[in-house]
Image: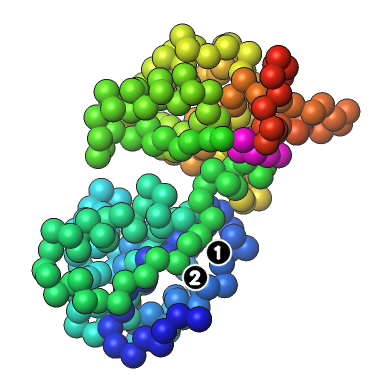
Amino acid sequence: MSAPRDKGWLTVIGLGPGGPHLTTPAVMNVISEATDLVGYGPYLDRIEGQEPSQRRHASDNRVEVERAGEALRLAAEGRRVAVVSGGDPGVFAMAAAVFEAIEAGDPAWRNIDVRVEPGVTAMLAAAAEVGAPLGGDFCAISLSDNLKSWATITRRLAAAAQADFVIALYNPASRARPHQLGEAFELLRGLKSGDDLVMFVRAAGTKEARVKLTTLAEADAADADMRTVVIIGSSQTRTIDRPDAQPWVYTPRREMVGEGGA
C-alpha cells in the first residue's frame, strides 16, 4: 500500500485508449481526489463530472513541458494535481515531460510527492482488436518528428526491421505529416518480406473500432490517421482464418524455425 499523501502531490495518469471501461479504477481514484486536473483539452473533456472545487487547466498538445511545469507549481503550492494523458502516461506521454521539467526546474520540485499511475496504452488495445500480434518480441516507435529528427526515426525503424521485431507505430499520420508513414513503409519494404502482415487499427477500444488487415507490400498509408495504431508483424506473425469473421492474428511466443508467417 502506498504511503498516505497529506500535502500537495502530483500524479500522472492515463485514461486508456478508448472508452471509460479502459480507464483503471486506480486512475479514477486519483481523479476523484485531485483538486486540479492538468492536460491536453480533449483528454480533459473525456473526464465526466466535476467536483465544484475542482479546477481544470487545459492546454494545447505541443506544450508538454510547459504543462508539466504548471502542474508542478500547483503541487508545490499544496494542490493535489492529476496530470492527464491518454493511454498509458509513460508511453509517449506526460510522465516523461514531468520528469524532464523536474530535472531542469526548481530544485524544490524534487521534494514533491510525484507518482505515475499506469494505464492501458494504445498498442495493447489495438493488438486486442486483432488477437495477439504482440505475443513475441516487439517494439513501439512514434513517427512524430516534433521532438526528434526523422533521421533518428528511420534509423530505429531499420534496426527494428533487421532484428525482426513486431513494430507498433504510434502517431502514424497527421495533416502536418501526411507523407511519413508512406516513407516508413518504403523503408521497411527494402528490409522485410512484402508478405509480412500489417494491421491498421483505428479507434481501438471503442465501439467505432475498425481493423484493416493487409500485407507490407499492399499497405497504403492513406488508411491511417492520428487515431490509428499501425502494427507491422514479424516474420513469425501469422493468421488463423475464420469462415465468417476477420482472421485472428498472433505472433507465437516460441520461435518457429523454418516456418513462415501468413
Q: Residue 57: where, in percent of width, then height? A: 28, 69
Q: Nearer the viewer, residue 45 or 25?
A: 25
- Element at label 2: helix
Please give the name of the residue rendered at 48% of the width and 36% of the height, measured from the top-left corner: 139
For residue 174, what is the image quadrant? top left
Closer to the camera in the image, 103 or 175: 103
Place of residue 190 in the rendered image (x, y in percent of width and height, measured from the top left): 46, 9
Is residue 225 visible in the rendered image? The answer is no
**Height in image: 258 above or below 151?**
above
Quick check: 142 left or right of 73? Answer: right
Q: Amino acid at mark 1?
A: Thr
Give the labeled residue for mark 1: 23
- Mark 1: secondary structure: loop
User: Image quarter for residue 99?
Assistant: bottom left
Q: Which residues are magenta?
A: 131-136
Q: In the rendered image, is residue 81 in sight? A: yes
Question: Is residue 56 found inside the magenta-colored segment of the image?
Answer: no
Q: Residues within 10 Å of mark 2 (few under 14, many from 20)?
A: many
Name the main secondary structure of what is drawn in magenta.
loop
Q: Please identify the quadrant where the C terminus is shown.
A: top right
The answer to whether marks 2 and 1 mark residues whose Cβ atoms lie closer than 8 Å is yes
Residue 43: x %, y % from top left: 41, 59
**Residue drawn 81% across the image and 33% down it:** 245
Residue 74 at what x, y percent from top left? 22, 76
Q: Which mark is residue 27?
A: 2
The scheme the figure's colours follow is: rainbow
